[in-house]
Amino acid sequence: MSQHRHPGAPDRAGAVPALPDLPEATVARLPEYLRALHNLAETGHETISSEGLANAAGVNSAKLRKDLSQLGSYGTRGVGYDVGLLIEQIEYVLGLTQRRAVALVGVGNLGHALAGYDGFASRGFRIAALLDADPGRVGEEINGLVVRHIDELPRVAAEDSIAIGVIATPATAAQQVADQLVAVGVTSILNFAPCVLSVPSGVDVRKVDLAVELQILSFHEHRKASQTAFPTAGGSALTALPGGLAVTESQEAIGT
Amino acid sequence: MSQHRHPGAPDRAGAVPALPDLPEATVARLPEYLRALHNLAETGHETISSEGLANAAGVNSAKLRKDLSQLGSYGTRGVGYDVGLLIEQIEYVLGLTQRRAVALVGVGNLGHALAGYDGFASRGFRIAALLDADPGRVGEEINGLVVRHIDELPRVAAEDSIAIGVIATPATAAQQVADQLVAVGVTSILNFAPCVLSVPSGVDVRKVDLAVELQILSFHEHRKASQTAFPTAGGSALTALPGGLAVTESQEAIGT
DNA sequence: ATCTGTGAATGCCTTCACAGCA
DNA sequence: TGCTGTGAAGGCATTCACAGAT
């Protein structure tokens, strides 16, 4: 696939470099690889094997190689991957070569924290606007940005060319906010409100529900507890606090 | 499967009711069904069809039926599911019949927000302790809880019988905190720090990385943009802002 | 007539194992 | 020799479509 190009940058000649329709599972892991690669770069590594990168990212190496091969990959047999080159590649594929502007709606408890989260700025995003429906919150300054009223969304979207909307409102307000975001042309939404959003096709929604994460962990706690009730059953699993560290793979066993 | 029991409560007679080894994909959706069911209960529904519940939860009805059938399910053909009964069932399976105690480590920006997040309390969890390594933060009161020093973790864990640890520290501190949690017997960890954790087998880790979510959305933005560059290619997909609302399924298309 | 529960089919993802390049 | 890239196999998850209960 994409036979043997090692250009300094991802093929910026003719029309768009063909973003090759990656499997969703792969897309979801690329950010993790990217983070691991940045760590490696900072600690002076210029090259890394699939095994090494897989460990740093918490996956197994076969999966990693297959994922990277999807991008038309840039490894050297017998050597490994060029860290800098791979960072460029992945950032390009993820569309991080331009810093995307994010509008955050809902500046309550969670919204405050998100507004101040460094991780966004350091990893390709710029929080360009804070919005809220509560007049009592409008005007407040958070982290150098002034909270504006949600009715100003159309103006804000135009001025800052917002690419992504983040919803951190109560569930009751979320659908309305989503509608407003869609109306001003936003086609990607990250939803922290615990509810399902209806959006037109062509608009992507991802949802993060903090309580759901805990509930999934709770299920596994429950299972572990009910298993220890039958000391004989269950096979070799689950010796509480055994000696060695499990491979990082254990994260994955629980899935995303 | 589990032929025809409709007990008032999930079979509390002999030894543990056999938690039937559910597929991870199903487990991850149960919390969503539960939330939808609570909504339905509040709006006075006593019964709901698979179609109706599937809509409320943002999945398709075949998937929902298969998921519920895994629990030995409690539906009536020709009628639907009993909302109250199903809530009991799912809460039992998820281990939410006991309110689990959570220790939150790291009371920075994000930790503050999590400490104040209502969704935990209202959905089966109790934040029992706030911990931080920074002496400057110890003693601060957040939402009725006083921040204690991380060195007190062993005492805290024993007193409050902590079931789940939440890590909201910087990435540099996360592994050490995880080790400390594991050392005091915590077997479930929710990690907000952008790094991979190594833990012994038998310990479950789930990771939430806010920047990763945005990066995945960024990929899809990038793809959408590069597709519109070729108006002819791509087939019928992606008419920007078309008329009808997409089925709630669009969330899923992006996958979790 | 309606709606659940489920075999069967399909498709996606992961893992294995090795061919082939450096 | 060492490590990537990839066919092939196997395992999960989703979807279809209908038998069967009420």
Image (cartoon, coloured by chain):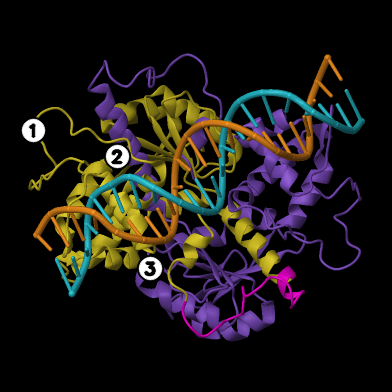
Chain colours: A purple, B yellow, C cyan, D orange
How many C-alpha atoms fall within 10 Å of the one at disc 1: few (<14), some, or many (≥20)? Answer: few
Residue A192 in picture, x, y percent from top left:
45, 61
Depth check: A11 or A99 in front?
A11
Q: Report the magenta stretch's main SS.
A: loop
Neighbourhood count class around disc 3 (C-alpha, 10 Å): few under 14, some 14–19, many 20 upward: some
Assign a secondary structure to mark 2. Answer: strand
Cα separation between marks 2 and 3: 24 Å
Q: Is residue D1 above or below residue B51?
A: above
Q: Earlier in the sequence, mark 1 or mark 2?
A: 1
Q: According to the image, label 2 marks what residue?
A: B101
x, y percent for residue B197 = 54, 33
Q: Secondary structure at mark 1?
A: loop
Q: Say which element carries label 3.
A: loop
Which amino acid type is marked by label 3?
Pro
Whether residue B28 sits left or right of residue A69 in the image: it is left
Q: Amino acid at mark 1?
A: Ala
**Do residues under tags 3 and 1 come within 8 Å of each other at their CB atoms?**
no
Magenta-colored span: B226-245
Do the dots labelled 1 and 2 sit on one chain? yes
Q: Is residue B139 visible?
A: no
x 70%, y 28%: residue: A51
Disc 1 to disc 2, how far (Cα)?
A: 26 Å
Q: Which residue is mark 3?
A: A170
Q: Within the image, what quadrant is residue A82 found in? A: top right
